[in-house]
Amino acid sequence: MARDRTIALTDDCIMHTYKRVPIVITRGKGVYLWDSSGKRYIDFLGARGAANTGYSSPEVVRAITAQAKRLVHVTNDFYTRPQAELARLLVRHSCAEKVFFCNSGAEANETAIKLSRLSSYRKYGPGRYVVITAANSFHGRTYGALSATAQKKYQTGFEPMVPGFRYVQFNDTDGMGAALGDDVCAVMLEPVQGEGGVYPGSVEYMKSVREQTQRKDVLLIMDEVQVGLGRTGRLFAYENYGIRPDIVTLAKSIAGGVPMGAVLAGGHAADVLDLGTHGTTFGGAPIAAAAGVAAVGSIIKHRLSENAKKLGSIALKRLLKLKETHGTIIKDVRGMGLIIGIEFYDDRRAAAVYAQCLKDGLITNITNGNTIRFLPPLVITRDELGRGMDIFEDALSHRHFE
Ligand SMILES: Cc1ncc(COP(=O)(O)O)c(C=O)c1O
């Protein structure tokens, strides 16, 4: 189908929930995407964090192909080997003891919220159901996850939100202490706020939250949907803080691009969801689970978290230099491993730099209005990173407003 026809059909027949650029993507390999005209792009957006193992990773493609020939889907009324293998892999490499599989990040967070409330209900009875989340967070678009997402712009028009969520300032230890009343069952935080503009949690904050929640027997949920599985320089982002959360939620890159989510739980939290308390038709389905074994296995085997740490620090250094030379344009540069945000003083400048990059073959995106975000596949090489950064640097110097 020709490019124009694809765009016209999409605009005619699909709800307009996404701001799409008029580019039809036809192929991907590693850190590269190609459009219908054959133009190649370096993708620093990495499918919004769903492409840690790169596009069409050979390991993931092999696993999907082999599994599709054997069994595409079967109900969770039966046992399947890929699901068992993926669960073992995740448990072995995390602080968790048990896993629940679902289909997306929002669903993983819904599950974590349900688990927390049920846990508290069984231990303490009704009334202890509040989940604390942080201002500027993003946890997904379903009702529980949306209610947890402390940003008005996502909630407006969909009220009333689910009751029982309390919002605090991120990285504010005292604020957390004040919010942790006797009605709280869980605290849910992103280790690095991604959609909110790339704001890493500080070590002191995360340690203090862990200590405070433990003291109050409140579950700590780390939403690692965007930054888990190698991106921050460790397999799990919580490892950067020297803490053990009770629950970790994952999605995006867990199955190499096949839709999947997972909830990892340890200690008491591992045994809360029991027969009939939760479920989903496609959770841990054979294709996704087989892809997951290949994707998570390859993140571990190829030490992609170490690559993220090394190349993330190279990129951050170069960007901090650019902040000095472009001090009137760039307000701040921050990140952890290979999630990096470049905040501009002016939203229009961020938009112009983004557009120029795209024209020159580099895909990025803008988050929080004024922050260009890099989330490249973790298989990126130093050379590929350098070439993408060259395009970004050139775009900064472009005379956009003249
Ligand atoms: C931190 C975080 N949590 C949850 C979600 C929701 O995930 P999904 O879009 O798979 O529902 C996202 C998506 O961007 C996210 O970044």
Image (tube, rainbow, N blue to C red):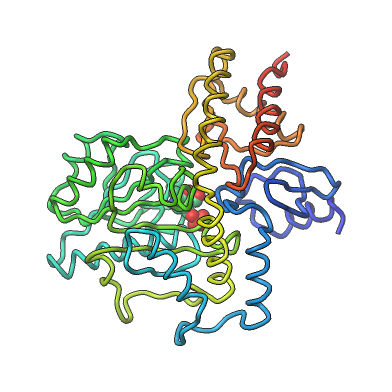
Residue 72 horizontal/vertical position (percent): 62, 79
34 in relation to 106, above or below: above
Residue occupying the point 32% across, 63% down: 265
**Which quadrant of the structure image shows residue 294?**
bottom right
Q: Residue furthest bottom?
A: 78
**Residue drawn 40% across the image and 75% down it:** 279
The correct choice, above or below, for 63 with respect to 36 in the image is below
**Frontmost residue, 305 versus 175:** 305
Give the image location of residue 380, x and y in percent: 63, 43
> Residue 76: where, in percent of width, then height?
46, 82
Q: Is residue 157 visible?
A: no
Residue drawn 73% across the image and 53% down it: 28
> Up-down: is 96 above or below 199?
below
Q: Is residue 149 visible?
A: yes
Query: In this orientation, which residue lies closer to the viewer: 347 or 334?
Result: 334
Position above or below: 187 against 391: below
Instruction: Judge from the rendering whether residue 395 lies leftward or rightward of residue 80; answer left or right.
Output: right
- Quarter of image, res 382: top right
